[in-house]
Image (spheres, grey):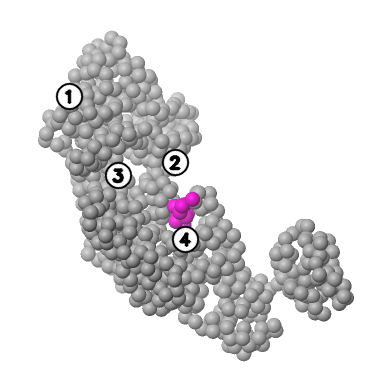
Amino acid sequence: MDNSKIKNRTSLAVSRRVQKLREEISRLRFLYHVKDDPEVTDDVWDSLSRELKSLLEKYPEFIDPNSPENRVGGEPLEKFVKVKHDIRMLSLNDAFSEEEIIEWENRCLKIFGSPTSKYSMGMNYFCEVKLDGLSASLHYKDGVFVRGATRGDGFIGEDVTENLKMIESIPLRLNGNNKGDIEVRGEVVMTKKAWQKLNKKQETLGKATFANTRNAAAGSLRQLDPKIVQERGLDFFAWDIVQFPTNILNHSDKHKILKEIGFQITPYERKVKNLKEVFSFIKEIGKVRATLPYGTDGMVISIDDLEVQEILGYVGKAPRYMVAYKYEAERATTIVTDITVNVGRTGVLTPVAHFNPTLVAGSTVSKATLHNIDQINRLDIRIGDTVVIQKAGDVIPEVVEVLIKMRTGKEKKFKMPEFCPVCNSKIERHSIGNRESPMSRDENKQSSSSQGNLTTGFGESPMSDGLAPLLPRPRTSRRGAFPESRGVVSVAYYCTNKHCPARSSRGLQHFVNIFEIYEIGPKILDKLKDEGLISDPADLFTLEKADLSGLERFGEKSADNIISSIQLHKKISLWRFVYALGIIHVGEQTARDLANYFGSLEKIKKTEIVEINNIENIGPVVSESIFKFFRDKTNLNLINKLLENGVSIYHEKAKNLKLSGKSFVLTGTLSTMSRNDAKKKIMENGGNVASSVSSNTSYVVAGENPGSKYTDAKKLGVKILTESEFLKIV
Ligand SMILES: [Zn+2]
């Protein structure tokens, strides 16, 4: 295919994706702004918008000035009277990282900051927590509240005066003697407590619950009956004055005035001198965000000086002088590039979805377990699908839902393999009664009566070796994730080979130890297997921080430690690699002998029994075992997978073979090193270590309180070394 054809094909694919994104963003926006009935959280919408934005940056030929991404908000519903805002209500541009805030500052500096300008020396910023609610504008005439409106599309909102009057924190008469027109703007919010209470009540009444505090606030303010608004316990926090009789110099002064005339202002605000202080305030609030009584989604940063604000002005719908930092999204969208299968300790097969790497809640996620085939069916997830992934708090990344509307028709359905991906044995399918319901909360309730007597067979193992199968664990359900879930019997797939390498964690532990990834102990290994994160040693090298930090009792720090240890030990010497493979009869010494003799993995793989047998110290039984190992397809697949996943092997001919051919026996306690370290030192220098003294022993190293080996050495006339003498020769 020539270049222009490839280009056309890419161009077509991009154009299709852009179109799909536009349609879906527009539909979600309508549901969100106009219907107050969002299908997804804003993170999802943000994520799709960001993808569209970055596609359009790369392919500007698809920019369309009339397309929905250039429009904000939606039309107000017909049921309230429409009001035109005197001054347009703007929206804010978002920043998702410190870098983006720095870029924002640079853009500002470029506009007004000539080197001689009074602002080029730096400026003050005003930071305030961004409460997650509904923006409203309040009009006061001669100090009396006369009209209140929602933001709407920024130009036209809805008159909700009577409802706003029900909010206790909105003063009906301002403090002080205020003449003329005053317009105050702020956020109508609901506390997390009030939201929970409201949801409980909605549930008892059999009514729909609200997904978050913002929806609850928005839904409540839009009630036509002000009495209901009163019951809901809404709150109001002011953040701006856009009309005021006297001149105001700084944004921070506006907040002072707001307080004076009787408003609550955002509970966390700070005037700072530079971006460094902005970042530290962002971090400070980031730590306590979850514990605040109100939902927050970011931090609004503005240039404090109103004169500077004036100079900077607006670009499109947003002011240049203000930016909204958004805290890490807990949900994002991505594309499923593949679905593979891991084999667990009981032989159970766990499907894993692979994605285009995506940043969620601070870590990059490129895969998530799908747990079992039921989950795949429930989500109807296919290869090529655009999905919503979630990593909330300490949760392992998971697929929450598929954005069905983003499908192109080219998505591929997933099928469980017929043969084990690890050992190639046949796969069997078993039905298991399901104790935990995989259904969503609401559905649970509806079907709870019919469910109790269907729970069967939990303790029955489909395997004959008495190992209870780990029941494929249904995940905590999320709103809307499992719309079609009605089944109770779950299906699991098992590898039928009792000796499938994936079923033994002993081999895996050996591997981890030889690779010196000491941070991973048996408990962690079991967890990783149970979660379907790994089925063989090669999978270790694709682990991400996001996989680990979600595991129970797993701190960020230990996740970091494990990942960095794995990365650090990816480069390994040939003998350690061979030893780690766990070939029957091949211990440390034989592995070293093989490495030294052949010098490369390729040569070891291709060798014949006779040649192995030629190596000193390696007998026929061991030779055969080695030969067979490297002729086995499963083993070769594992080796290839290890190399593909980034393991690199080096071989250095031992530089210092001063102890070559020397045999050591250790006895007693050494004061400067452990016995294992001493052994390591001897072997690094070409020597070997035996467990008992014989006439072949070259040296006995005697530490404190030596045992019978010491007397044996004396008897046989073997040279005895003190610890310091030993240290000199190694
Ligand atoms: Zn198997």
Q: Earlier in the sequence, mark 4 or mark 2?
A: 2
Q: CA distance from mark 1 to mark 3?
A: 29 Å
Residue at (35%, 40%) from the top-left corner? Answer: 94
Which quadrant, please, contains the C terminus?
bottom right
Q: Is residue 100 left or right of residue 612?
A: left
Dot 1 falls on a residue whose secondary structure is helix
Residue at (38%, 59%) from the top-left corner? Answer: 368
Range drawn in magenta:
542-553
The image shows residue 47 at horizontal and vertical percentages of: 32, 49
- Image position of 451 with respect to 179: above or below: below
Q: Can residue 374 be seen in the rendering of this structure?
A: no
Camera-near label (3 vs 4) is 4
The front one of 296 and 604 is 296
Camera-near label (1 vs 3) is 1
- Which residue does the numbered mark 4 point to in the structure image? 528
- Which residue does the numbered mark 3 point to in the structure image? 42
Residue at (32%, 46%) from the top-left corner? Answer: 43
- CB atoms at circles 1 and 4 under 8 Å apart? no
The image shows residue 578 at horizontal and vertical percentages of: 59, 74
Camera-near label (4 vs 2) is 4
The image shows residue 137 at horizontal and vertical percentages of: 24, 26
Which labelled disc corresponds to residue 98?
2
Q: CA distance from mark 2 to mark 1?
A: 41 Å
Q: Earlier in the sequence, mark 1 or mark 4?
A: 1
Camera-near label (1 vs 4) is 4
